[in-house]
Image (cartoon, rainbow, N blue to C red):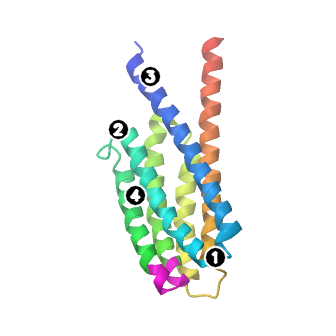
């Protein structure tokens, strides 16, 4: 016997996840465009963007966890939201110390948030599927974070450029995940109709 309540709950969760991934992709695309268009020319705008990015991530993880059963049921996201809040504060301090410090803060954040994102995606895979891009994104984020920390001492272009490149890859992963879920939903509807 099919449990229609569970099926409808999963369908609702899948709809939310698709919207969430599109929202995350859209924010990242706009952020990257602003970083490349004006963040490279203005130190003040670059600083603002570097503070907004982890703050947005904290809010997005909080909203997603809340919509997906709450913080207790989604510990990886709850921890990710807390780490992103701490990263926002650390970014404010690091901006006063120099771009190398900013890169170290973002590197540590990319490692931790990437591993937590990977954990969230693995947990979701069982019920929702279509998480392979989020698993890749989490793993790549952790690797990119290590690379940021190594590069923090080297001469480099402004940190906003490196972080914008990282954010653009993240946007792509969120977009791929959203499209993958959309296609999966369309296939299921086609099978149900036929």
Which circle, 1 or 3, is nearer the viewer?
A: 1
Q: Position of residue 18 (x, y in %)?
A: 55, 38
The stretch in magenta equals: 94-102
Secondary structure type for disc 2: loop
Relative side of 185 to 94, left or right? right
Q: Which residue is mark 3?
A: 7
Foreground pick, 16 / 148: 16
Foreground pick, 144 / 38: 38
Query: Relative to 175, is 36 above or below?
Result: below
Relative side of 128 to 194, left or right? left
Secondary structure type for disc 3: helix
User: Earlier along the polypeptide chain: callout 4 or callout 1?
Assistant: 1
Crowding around mark 3 (Cα neighbors within 10 Å: few <14, some 14 to 19, many 20+) is few
Foreground pick, 42 / 30: 42
Q: Position of residue 150 (x, y in %)?
A: 55, 81
Q: Position of residue 168 (x, y in %)?
A: 65, 59
Q: Which mark is residue 42?
A: 1
Crowding around mark 1 (Cα neighbors within 10 Å: few <14, some 14 to 19, many 20+) is few
Q: Which mark is residue 80?
A: 4
Distance from disc 1 to disc 3, alpha carbons, whole Å, reads 50 Å
161 within the magenta span:
no
Q: Which residue is mark 2?
A: 69
Q: Quadrant of residue 67?
A: top left
Secondary structure type for disc 4: helix
């Amino acid at each position: 016997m099919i449990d229609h309540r569970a099926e409808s709950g999963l369908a609702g969760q899948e709809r939310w996840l698709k919207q969430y991934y599109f929202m995350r992709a859209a924010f990242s695309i706009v952020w990257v465009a602003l970083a490349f268009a004006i963040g490279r020319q203005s130190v003040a705008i670059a600083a603002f963007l570097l503070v907004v990015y982890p703050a947005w991530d904290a809010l997005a993880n909080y909203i997603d966890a809340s919509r997906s059963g709450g913080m207790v049921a989604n510990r990886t996201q709850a921890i990710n939201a807390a780490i992103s809040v701490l990263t926002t504060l650390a970014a404010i301090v690091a901006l006063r110390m120099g771009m190398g410090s900013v890169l170290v803060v973002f590197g540590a954040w990319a490692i931790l948030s990437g591993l937590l994102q990977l954990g969230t995606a693995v947990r979701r895979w069982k019920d929702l599927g279509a998480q392979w891009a989020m698993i890749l994104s989490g793993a790549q984020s952790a690797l990119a974070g290590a690379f940021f920390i190594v590069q923090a001492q080297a001469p480099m272009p402004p940190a906003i450029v490196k972080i914008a490149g990282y954010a653009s890859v993240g946007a792509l992963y969120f977009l791929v995940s959203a499209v993958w879920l959309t296609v999966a939903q369309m296939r299921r509807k086609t099978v149900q109709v036929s």
